[in-house]
Image: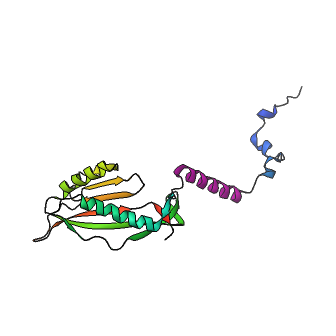
Amino acid sequence: MPMRVRSPALQPLASLRKRPSLGISAGLPSPPFRRAFAAFLLLGVVAAATGCSTPHTAGGTLDDGRQRVTALVLEAAHALPATVTFTPPTEVGEQPCRKTVAGFVIGKTGAHRAEVPLIVKVSPGSGRRMLDVIANAWSDAGYRLNRSRLGETDFPQLSADTPDGYHVTATALTRPPGPGEKSTLDLYAVSQCLRGS
């Protein structure tokens, strides 16, 4: 009786497992290395997708920035009616510019932003109206306005970017002040990242 030979494709899997390896996996790295490489690759993809948000360092010095932010808040205050009162700022703060990747701070750039607040006392109930006065002044000066927070109930805010890269905000405190107190309007200006003194 003739013997039937079974096709190798039909042989049981157990017999295929007993055969020697073809040596294809001999050159592949070990599993721990592959996992580390995959994690590193994933981190690179995330960083590329989210981007490095390290701020640009602008031209000019930090001292130029201090003078400019002071001038910006004073210009806004002087655009208001003569009935408001304020004390011109005598000090300008600084905040370091930080390097970030995927939302995580990884260090400092060595540059700083100059920043200054100015509190303006206004008649009770007039804070929101004063924001419109400032909006007109900033618009006339060519600032790019952001009115998205003007509708807030307690702290309506107007912000703008100047043509030379500075950022300014005006926030009104619309809650009724205490007896004998005036309402306030908070002005704030901040520079781009600057180096030097």
53 versus 115 height, above or below: above
Identify the residue at image location x=24%, y=56%: 156
Magenta span contains residue 39: yes
Q: Which residue lies furthest to the top in this view?
A: 1
Identify the residue at image location x=63%, y=56%: 40
Q: In which quarter of the image is residue 168?
A: bottom left
Residue 1 visible? The answer is no
Q: Which of 33 and 163 is in front in this view?
A: 163
Q: In which quarter of the image is the N terminus?
A: top right
Magenta span contains residue 59: no
Label count reads 0
Q: Which of 103 and 107 is in front in this view?
A: 107
Relative image position of residue 186 (x, y in whole percent):
26, 64
Q: Is the magenta stretch mostly helix, strand or loop?
A: helix
Relative to 73, 175 lies left or right? left
Q: What stretch is highlighted in magenta?
A: 29-51
Q: Nearer the viewer, residue 79 or 182?
A: 79
Relative image position of residue 85 (x, y in whole percent):
19, 67
Relative image position of residue 141 (x, y in whole percent):
32, 51
Q: Quadrant of residue 185?
A: bottom left
Identify the residue at image location x=25%, y=54%: 134
Q: Residue furthest bottom?
A: 90
151 versus 195 height, above or below: above
Relative image position of residue 181 (x, y in whole percent):
14, 70
Relative to 190, 148 lies left or right? left
59 versus 24 height, above or below: below
